[in-house]
Structure formats: structure tokens, C-alpha cells
Image (cartoon, rainbow, N blue to C red):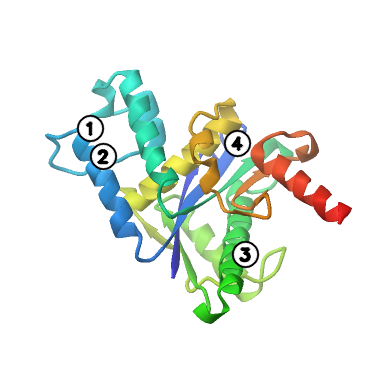
Amino acid sequence: MHLLYLDESGGVAEVDQKYYVLGGISVHERKPYFLSKTVDELQKDLFPSATEPIEFHGSVIKNGGAEPWKSMKRQERTSALERAYDILLHEDVSLFAVAMHKASFPGKDPVERTCEEMSGHFDAYLARLENEDPKGGKERGLMIFDQCNHQATLHALLAKYRATGASWGKVRHLSEIPMFTDSKLTRMLQFADLVAYAVFRRYEHSDAQFLDRIIPKFDQSGGKLHGLVHMIADRDNCYCPACVTRRTSQAHTTAQ
């Protein structure tokens, strides 16, 4: 079983934000315990006197929005974020994110469109793992979201994708409808938040400081970044890693 933990960054309807991002981290079911321990150890190093778990949320750490981050200097907060992202870089994980330029899709629900893209790419990832190891049996996945205002919508969407299909076909590798939990209870959703935040900073503010650290961990094969999707009308003139690798891959296929 492969678990995909997901969180959002950016607003659905906020007019002052161009992007809505759904991002996450996929791991084998045996991995969350060990990954969570690495964050516990990082917290112990940063805050040795803390007796309760401290949440690692990208925007809160970056901006010092709440204690104990608020009392830290900016450089110290940035260093803490970099250390958290470096955990992802050195662990056996696969990252996914969909960044939707809202103005490119007028009248479209960002939650629905990014969820459709995400479920399709996760399903394809599981299918690829299955094909790479035919003796390993059927690969199954479960999508786990941070608690949000879109739970009913996401339940309905994933149930539909499994039963009748999405625009690209039926989801075949998800074992259940999505689950929801509080990020306070699992470090894995805090990792998902960090992924979504890094992608949001890249597309909303042209700040690739954190995304550049973890870009090698996004699902990819054949020189194409499958795990990072940039949804924008003028994709042919975009030079972000997601758009560039897609154009390069398409050109290579056409040439063949």
C-alpha cells in the first residue's frame, strides 16, 4: 500500500492570489513512522525544552506567524525550513504537486481540477510501479488529506473517479475513498504542507528557494516530471521545470 498525504496552499477564491496548489508526499505504508521520527529529532534539536509536538508548516515558519517560530530570527527560521526540506531530499519518497493558474481556467473549480489531476498522476504512478515489478502484485494507494472545507467535495470526486472515471479514464489503483485527519496528529501531513508551500512560493512569488531543494524527489521517468504539474493556458511559453520537461519529452517522442 502506498499512502499519498495531501495539503493545499493558496486560496480557492482569493482574488489576490493567482495560484491554487495541491501538493503531497507518497510513501510506502511502512515509511511514515520512520519519517516522522526524523522530524521529531529535528524538533528536539531546534527546541530541546519542548515537551509537546511542534507543527512544521511552511508559511508559519517562513513568516514567523506563531510561537515558537515567532521568537526566532529570520535566518534561523529559514535554516529550519531548509533542514526540513533536506529530510525529503534524502529519504525514499515521491513528491506530487499540481499548481493551477486560476485565471487560465475561468469558471473551473480549483479543488476539482487539481484533485482530478492529482488522482490521475498518482494512479499512473502506481500503475508504473506495478509494471516495473510484475511479480509484486497489484499496487494499491490511499489518498489522505488534511482536514479542510472541501471534504464533501473531495469524497464525491474520488468516489466518482473510481466508479465512472475522470476526463482521462477510471482510477484503478485506489483502495478506498480519501481519508481526512488533522495535521497536528501526523508529521506526514506537515511534510505535505511543506511540499505545497514550496510549489506555491515558486509559482505565486517566483521564489524557487525551497522547490529547487526538493525537485529531484518529484515523480519522474523518461526525463519527464510526472509529479509536478503546472496548469496554465500558455504552457508553451512557460519555462518552469514541469512545462520544460513536458515539451522536451513530447519533442523527443515526435522525433522518434
Determine which residue is flagged by label 1. 46
Q: What x and y, as percent, mark residue 172? A: 60, 74
Quarter of the image that includes the N terminus: bottom left
Residue 17 visible at all: no
Q: Is residue 160 above or below residue 183?
A: below
In what element is the residue under mark 3?
Answer: helix
Three-letter residue code for mark 1: Leu
The reply to whether callout 1 and callout 2 are in contact (CB within 8 Å) is: yes
Q: Which residue is mark 3?
A: 124
Decide: few, some or many residues near mark 3? Use Cα within 10 Å; few <14, some 14-19, many ≥20. Answer: some
Residue sitting at the far front: 256
Separation of disc 1 and disc 2 at Cα?
Answer: 6 Å
Q: Which residue is mark 2?
A: 42
Between disc 2 and disc 3, the foreground one is: 2
> Tag on residue 19?
4
What kind of element bears circle 2? Answer: helix
Indicate the amino acid at tag 4.
Tyr
The reply to whether the C-beta atoms of the residues labelled 2 and 4 are less than 8 Å apart is no
